[in-house]
Image (cartoon, rainbow, N blue to C red):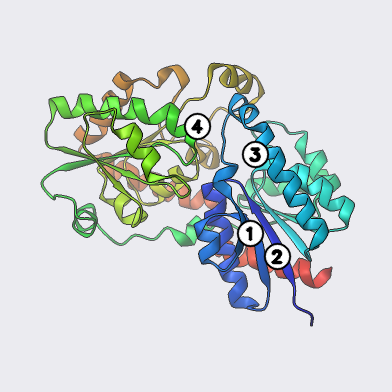
Amino acid sequence: MSQKNIVVITGEASGDAHAARMISELKQLRPDITVRGIGGDNMRAAGAEIMVDFSELAVMGLVEVLKRYRHIKNIFNQLLAELKANKPDLLVLVDYPGFNLKLAKQAKKMGIPVLYYISPKVWAWRAGRVKTIKRYVDKMAVLFPFEVSIYENAGVPVSCVGHPLVDAVKNTLTTKQAKIKTGLKLNRRVIGLFPGSRRSEIDNLLPVMLDAAERIQQRNTNVDVVLPLAPGIDETYINSLLAKSVVPVKVVNDQFYELTAACDAIVAASGTVTLEIALLAVPHFITYRVSPISYHILRRLIKIPYVGLCNIVTGKPVVLELLQDDVTAERLEAELTALLADASSKTKAEKIRKQVLTALGPSGGAHNAAQEVLNMLDNH
């Protein structure tokens, strides 16, 4: 059997983490397979050769993407040249549809089979992408059970591999134990600021989160503030934003789950991280804000009532969402204060954890995704 090589493409932190788990499983099943692509530290640690760091692509919002279009286009063209020069046995695309579906089209022309891992949110907006997927993608490996029928009805080969976080998010620590492990003081409440994994998100959300934290500390000196450093984000950049605030913030770039578990309340940008917070049963709420123009356009396009993944997968508003004009220091302060003051908030968070875990479906997501890769390599 000749040595196989695959290219994996992801454009953001959550995709890098999911792809890395899949690659780790793949390497255990078939150590001889070589992996290269676009990703970050997680994929690199899993054994992939990183051609371009995903931070070069991580942008959110229509206007924000347009500002960096030329740079992203140059990376796309470089990648096409690489695929032509060193044709892989399989191209694995991980979410990031604006970039990856265009790449799938070019791969089809080159005769490269395509596995798409983690579906674009066609159930939320741009349902027409299913037709594009049918044309250019050989197989979909989706995370959520409800996504299967969407592709089956369109005649697209699909498997639900399950969400990797079902297995990845494990925490046996109490809040107290987590505080000890992360060096936080037991006699103080801890607020977590989770402003996202893209610079555009952080620019929009971190300043208002800091304003809210400052208002809380002015009234309650018994509160500490922590911020986990997202993969691909430079700590110097974060510190430049923190320097504009009087709030002392502990920035942590490791022990993510332990730090999350140590928090008494969290305000988090919408994204995969909110599933992780929910699965750790930490009281939190979701917030998001983009440019006014992007929001005006997206509001007309999005077809579902929620943006938070916990609410989407359960089909109900189990976690509070504050969007756009509701993202104010006053409102964030009020909601964080309410979570800290509510003696039952931890019990409520545990109930949400069980609901989300049930909705996420089967376990073994990363292993199942790796098996899909092997199936396609063997079949092609």
**Dots 2, 1 in contact, CB < 8 A:** yes
| Mark nearer the viewer, 2 or 1 | 2
Instruction: Please report whichever mark, 4 or 2, sits nearer to the chain's N-terminal start.
Output: 4
Q: Amino acid at mark 4?
A: Ser
User: Distance of mark 4 from mark 2, alpha carbons?
Assistant: 34 Å
Looking at the rendering, in which quadrant would you find the C terminus?
A: bottom right
State the residue position of label 2: 372
Q: Amino acid at mark 3?
A: Lys
Instruction: Please report whichever mark, 1 or 3, sits nearer to the chain's N-terminal start.
Output: 3
Instruction: Please report whichever mark, 2 or 1, sits nearer to the chain's N-terminal start.
Output: 1
**Dots 3, 2 in contact, CB < 8 A:** no
| Mark nearer the viewer, 3 or 4 | 4
Badge 4: residue crowd in 10 Å (few <14, some 14–19, many ≥20) = some
State the residue position of label 3: 121
Badge 2: residue crowd in 10 Å (few <14, some 14–19, many ≥20) = many
The answer to whether residue 267 of the structure is visible from this angle is yes
Badge 1: residue crowd in 10 Å (few <14, some 14–19, many ≥20) = many
| Mark nearer the viewer, 4 or 1 | 4
Q: Residue at x 53, y 21 (%)?
A: 291
Q: Amino acid at mark 1?
A: Val
Q: Amino acid at mark 2?
A: Glu
